[in-house]
Amino acid sequence: KEWGGKGLLGATVRFDALENAEHQGVRVLEVFANSPAHAAGLIAYKDYILGTADIAIRDMDELVELVTVSMGKPIEVYVFNADTEAVRTVGLTPNSGWGGSGSLGCDIGSGLLHRIPAPRRVVPPARVTAQPDPTPAADMSPNGTSPTSLP
């Protein structure tokens, strides 16, 4: 039966490299009132736009491309917040007619000074509990006799 889409399974396999994940995303700097960024709940100096389910935003050019192809259409964007150290999804609709400059209504920073900060939370090490030895230990003296036995 034909399902009407690309491929045989109706699934997409995407390979992403995570070794440089801390260098990805762009930082939200200023958020302007009544803008698409404000309506989406973006938080100035705390939020980092990571991308969508389809693309990872690694630099300003990729964000510009995403905004250009999504003009006037709602998109779901993954955003990391430095205070909560959590990722959330945000509905954002780029719109150049919101009353200010730009299509998002926020200033964006990228590069060395705008990287995602290192985690503050200390993850406790995994607890290791002593497990009883399933085989009884032989309590033997060097001469092969039990310490409680008499020669």
Image (spheres, rainbow, N blue to C red):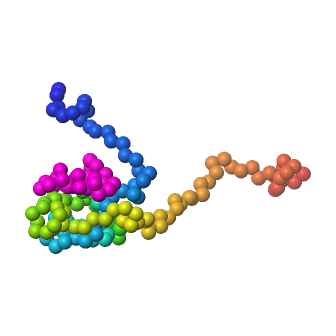
> Is 62 drawn above or below residue 28 in the view shown?
above
**Residue occupying image coordinates x 56% and y 58%:** 128
Residue 137 shown left or right of residue 41 in the figure = right
Residue 20 position within the rendered picture, expressed as x and y whole percent measured from the top left: 42, 53
Residue 57 shown left or right of residue 35 in the figure = right
Kindly tell me whether residue 85 is visible in this rendering.
no
Residue 85 position within the rendered picture, expressed as x and y whole percent measured from the top left: 36, 65
Counting the numbered discs, the total is 0
Furthest-bottom residue in this view: 33
Based on the displayed image, in which of its 4 quarters is residue 76 positioned?
A: bottom left
Furthest-right residue in this view: 151
> Is 135 drawn above or below residue 41 in the view shown?
above
Based on the displayed image, in which of its 4 quarters is residue 60 positioned?
A: bottom left
**Residue occupying image coordinates x 80% and y 51%:** 140
118 or 147, which lies in front? 118
Furthest-top residue in this view: 1
Kindly tell me whether residue 69 is visible in this rendering.
yes
Residue 42 position within the rendered picture, expressed as x and y whole percent measured from the top left: 24, 67
**Residue occupying image coordinates x 33% and y 54%:** 58
**Residue occupying image coordinates x 63% and y 48%:** 134
Q: Is residue 72 magenta?
A: yes
Residue 131 position within the rendered picture, expressed as x and y whole percent measured from the top left: 59, 54
Q: Is residue 63 magenta?
A: yes
Based on the displayed image, in which of its 4 quarters is residue 102 positioned?
A: bottom left
| The N terminus, quarter of image | top left
Residue 13 shown left or right of residue 39 in the figure = right
Magenta span of residues? 52-76
